[in-house]
Amino acid sequence: MSLLEWFDFYESGNPLIDSQHKQLLKMINNYKISCQFNMKEKAIREFIEFLKHYVEYHFQAEEAFQKTSMYPDFRKHQAAHDMICIQLKNLCLKLETKDYSNEFQNEFELFFINSVNKHLYEEDIPFCIFYKNYTEATAV
Ligand SMILES: [Fe+2]
């Protein structure tokens, strides 16, 4: 797994949102590095623990800025956040009630690739680009 790089065009210009996205990217890379050192179970547990807090404060902040900027894909984005929360809750429950297994590991990896990574690139970054244009257009 190659590491993710941060590019300036990912920035929304909003320091809170940008720092949170950078934090997520850093945690994704930490997870990938830990996996390379055969510490997958520890990496998964740490990443889930991080996400449990991250989704609470980041999703709320991002949605608030989407509302104030009248982001046209707000509902779609909110639905994606809701889906990530449901999947994460499900994974947490499994981790608490069942033993860590290969099946769980595979399920986490699908979530990691198809939900977390994909959301960052396909939904968060388009919002950041929109938000940057919005703030520039509305600046006095
Ligand atoms: Fe988002």
Image: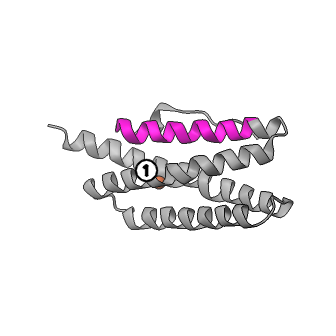
Q: Amino acid at mark 1?
A: Tyr
In the displayed structure image, the side of residue 78 where residue 92 appears, left or right: right
x and y percent of residue 138 in the render?
A: 20, 44
Residue farthest along the left direction in this orientation? 140
* Point 19% across, 39% down: residue: 139
Residue 18 shown in magenta: yes
Q: Position of residue 118 (x, y in %)?
A: 60, 54
Q: Residue at x 70, y 62 (%)?
A: 96
Q: Secondary structure at mark 1?
A: helix
Residue 24 spot, x, y in % from top left:
55, 42
In which image quadrant can residue 110 be found?
Answer: bottom right
Image-quadrant location for residue 34: top right
Q: Residue at x 44, y 49 (%)?
A: 58
> 45 left or right of 24?
right
User: Which of the image's four quarters has the N terminus?
Assistant: top right
Q: As displayed, is residue 71 above or below residue 54?
A: below
Category of crowding for the residue at label 1, using alpha-carbon neighbours closer than 10 angstroms: few (below 14), some (14–19), many (at least 20): few
Tell me the magenta residue range.
12-33
Identify whether 37 is placed above or below 114.
above
Where does the C terminus fall, quadrant-wise? Answer: top left
Q: Residue at label 1?
A: 57
Q: Give the side of residue 43 with respect to residue 131, left or right.
A: right
Q: Image point 61% across, 39% down: which residue? A: 27
Decide whether the magenta segment is chiefly helix, strand or loop.
helix
Tally of marks: 1
Is 103 placed above or below 42 here? below
